[in-house]
Image: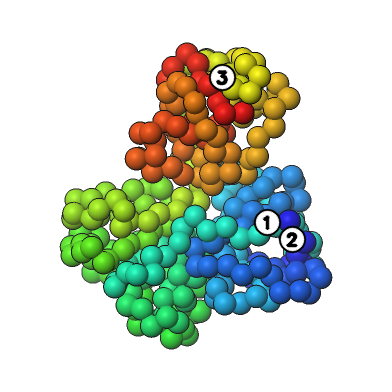
Amino acid sequence: MIDVLVTRKHTEAEGICSFELTALDEQPLPPFSAGSHIDVHLPNGLVRQYSLCNHPEERHRYLIGVLLDPTTRGGSQAMHDQVQEGSRLRISEPRNLFPLEHAAAYSLLFAGGIGITPILCMAERLAQAGADFELHYCGRSEERTAFIERIRRSGFGDRVQFHFDSGEASQRLDAPEVLSAPAADRHLYVCGPSGFMDFVLSTGREQGWAEAQMHREYFSAAPLATENLGSFEVQLASSGQCIQVPADRSVAEALLEAGIEIPLSCEQGICGTCLTRVLEGEPDHRDMFLTDAEHARNDQFTPCCSRSKSARLVLDL
Ligand code: FES
């Protein structure tokens, strides 16, 4: 954990604020690579993940961007309403689940809305390395699109195409055209609302892109279907104890009620913090952290959101 001070809070666009965080002890912050995020412990007790969007060589600050989303569970509201310049926060060290493939000959970056945050950091890194890339930044309108000025003033502004829903049809993202030339040394990266990401990824598949060359980071999960959820039991391999998981509880909640605490962060199947080994049984995977191939192995699952297809799961706990 790192104690930080909010040294700047700035409105970047309609509904989007950036927060500059510096270490309370004024020491350099831990280094990070492009695509990294931090956990932010909010004043209301929630923990949320935010991507770092400053230059990855900076050690004197972290910069995050937060979209006010009244439909979420209160994380962005707390950042906008309760966190001001001078506020103190606790954050985790940066973790990177969305790293760049540095061997790529060409990188295509796609950002939808606030999904620009990790993508901007990647663009900074690629530009600094002299790598070949292009960035497509889609937003509803110029007023609701963050960091436009920073991008225009950057040394890589000519590699960025803005696509606004409110603009003329000719400037909209033509994804089939942009993705028409997959190659073994080309990689694409996408971050944004899940509908936008699904659109880019499904277009990539249609155009022949391999899964291994399409990299994604979800910043919030689509609401899980809660109808027809069944109950099942989990067994702890160490003690043999069996714990019932009712339809209205997650595995993590049922474990906690039984006094077994597992590390949690996003609680939406995005971050992988709760990943637990499965020794027997077939999980019903509902996360976006593991790949399809990892899901198919059925040897680990995310108890914050995933469930079970079999009557019992034996967990390596
Ligand atoms: Fe993030 Fe489970 S806590 S995936």
Q: Quadrant of residue 179?
A: bottom left
Residue contact at pointers 2 and 1, CB within 8 angstroms: yes
Q: In which quarter of the image is residue 123?
A: bottom left
Quadrant of image for the C terminus: top right
Residue at 46 percent across and 44 percent down: it is: 289
The first of marks 3 and 2 along the sequence is 2
Image depth: mark 3 or mark 1 in front: 3
Relative depth, front residue between 211 and 71: 211
| Image position, residue 217 (x, y; %) | 45, 53
Please, what secondary structure does the residue beneath circle 1 have? loop
Residue at 69 percent across and 32 percent down: it is: 261
Q: Name the residue under label 1.
A: 92
Relative depth, front residue between 234 and 18: 234
Residue 283 in the image: above or below residue 80: above
Q: Name the residue under label 2.
A: 2
Residue 307 in sight here:
no
Per the model, the C-alpha gap separating discs 3 and 1 is: 30 Å
Horizontal side of residue 98 vs 52, given as left or right: left
Per the model, the C-alpha gap separating discs 3 and 2 is: 35 Å
Residue 161 in the image: above or below residue 39: below
At label 1, counting other C-alpha atoms closer than 10 Å, the crowd grade (few under 14, some 14-19, many 20 or more) is some
At label 2, counting other C-alpha atoms closer than 10 Å, the crowd grade (few under 14, some 14-19, many 20 or more) is some
Residue at 46 percent across and 50 percent down: it is: 218
Badge 3 residue CB within 8 Å of ligand 1? no
At label 3, counting other C-alpha atoms closer than 10 Å, the crowd grade (few under 14, some 14-19, many 20 or more) is many
Residue at 75 percent across and 69 percent down: it is: 23
| Image position, residue 233 (x, y; %) | 55, 16
Identify the amino acid type marked 3.
Val
Please, what secondary structure does the residue beneath circle 3 have? strand
Image depth: mark 3 or mark 2 in front: 3
Q: Mark 3 points at which residue?
A: 234
